[in-house]
Image: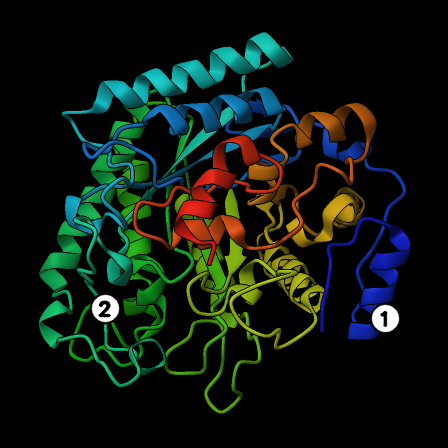
Amino acid sequence: MKYSVTNTREELERQCAEARVGLPFSEYTSVLATPVNILNRTVNNRMVYQAMEGCDGTLEGVPDELTIRRYMRFAEGGAGIIWFEATAVMENGRANPRQLYINEKNFDAFKNIVLDIKERCIKVNGYEPIVICQLTHSGRYSKPEGVPAPLIAYNNPIFEKDNPIDKSRILSDDQLDEICEALIKGAKLAERAGFDGADIKCCHRYLLCELLSAFTRENSRYGGSFENRTRLIRTAVEGALANRSRPFIITTRINAYDGFEYPYGFGVKDGEGIKPDFTEAKMLCRELVKLGMPLVNLTMGNPYVNPHVNRPFSYGPYEHPEPPIAGVARMLDGIAEVAAEIKGTPVISSGISYLGAMSPNVVAAYIRDGKFDFAGYGRETLAYPDLAKDICNYGTLNPKKVCIACGKCSEIMRKPGGTPGCVIRDGAVYAPLYKKLCAK
């Protein structure tokens, strides 16, 4: 069956009825233009541009021409928070040879782009955005020299099937300790570079996220029990908080649910298949807030294996296992359920690009009802970088400018040398690249 993004209320209601799910709707979206305070800093509005990795840095790990172009478009676009893309803290944790990698040698390049983002936003929009640096180790998706060089928490037959990764690639506890220290150091570098915060990335089945489901990792301080499986994210956050020298946001983008069966998925129960169970996600978020985390960014799924969970699509790499709108509802209702456990701590949503022009109306209703606090836009920002400005100025989005959820941006990203961007709305730059790398 073919699906399309919901650019009218009638289409939204039709798809919800067919999928037997409910999404709230508000005619008034002005709540998205209201400010929020985080650590005595004012966030100008409720729109967050989520971390969108460009795979277009230099081999030394610093922003290159297309990277800078993307962030200048984001800066002009009017979001209250710009969540800077996945930035490695170790060379062996880079997901591709052109992934950004912050270190002492290239520190000034990050300082320059943060300054440029803020100056451009002030010039165009009249305020300074909050800029968060996402710090990562790619784990099983590490490919620093362009060929797979996975570093894993445990073997996973769902991913590895008949070709299991050699056990020598399973990280030892000592190696995980080193990664934890690198994340803490990376947060300090981000602070020195002028970022307003650092995200200790724990989502989409990269290393820290994979550890959350390390039920089968035996005889390890990082496997088995909830305390052990969450040790790395908790220790890295605690260390980063202790190591800062000013009011600096230490946060995380974290999976509340992976979409894989026990014992290979987080957010599920033994014997209940892939049915979501947010018990441990709630427990972990409570622990992180107790440590002093002032902001949480929630998501789900794995873009490599089950992208319908974290970015429901109109067209994708496989047949839809469910109506896309059902994935949106699971994402937003699940985030709301987890957010209810940490009331008073702002929470960012995800997975709303499939809602098209109706996304402001749906997320405004959730925010109005106190379910979460921010609308987190991902691939939509590649298609429509001015979306935040349009929502604040007009209360709506232009259906002719929205992401159509075609998946071409991810398709380019998966190809060697690919740099993801919107083939449809930013075709002058990315259509030739798509034609070269992907078109049959």
Q: Which residue is mark 1?
A: 17
Q: Position of residue 250 (x, y in %)?
A: 39, 38
Q: Residue at x 19, y 62 (%)?
A: 151
Q: Which quadrant: the N terminus? A: bottom right
- Three-letter code for the amino acid on which mark 1 is drawn: Ala
- Three-letter code for the amino acid on which mark 2 is drawn: Ala
Distance CA(mark 2)–CA(mark 1): 41 Å
Q: Position of residue 225 (x, y in %)?
A: 31, 75
In the picture, measured across the screen, residue 177 lies left or right of residue 55, that is: left
Observer-nearest of 154 and 37: 154
**Depth-wise, is mark 2 or mark 1 nearer the camera?**
1
Quadrant in which residue 293 is drawn: top left
Q: Residue at x 44, y 54 (%)?
A: 438
Q: Position of residue 359 (x, y in %)?
A: 74, 46
SS label for mark 1: helix
- The reply to whether residue 89 is in sight is yes
In the picture, measured across the screen, residue 42 lies left or right of residue 220, that is: right
Observer-nearest of 203 and 281: 203
**Marking on residue 153:** 2
Observer-nearest of 434 and 219: 434
Residue that lies at the very extreme toward the front in this rendered image: 440
- The reply to whether residue 43 is in sight is no
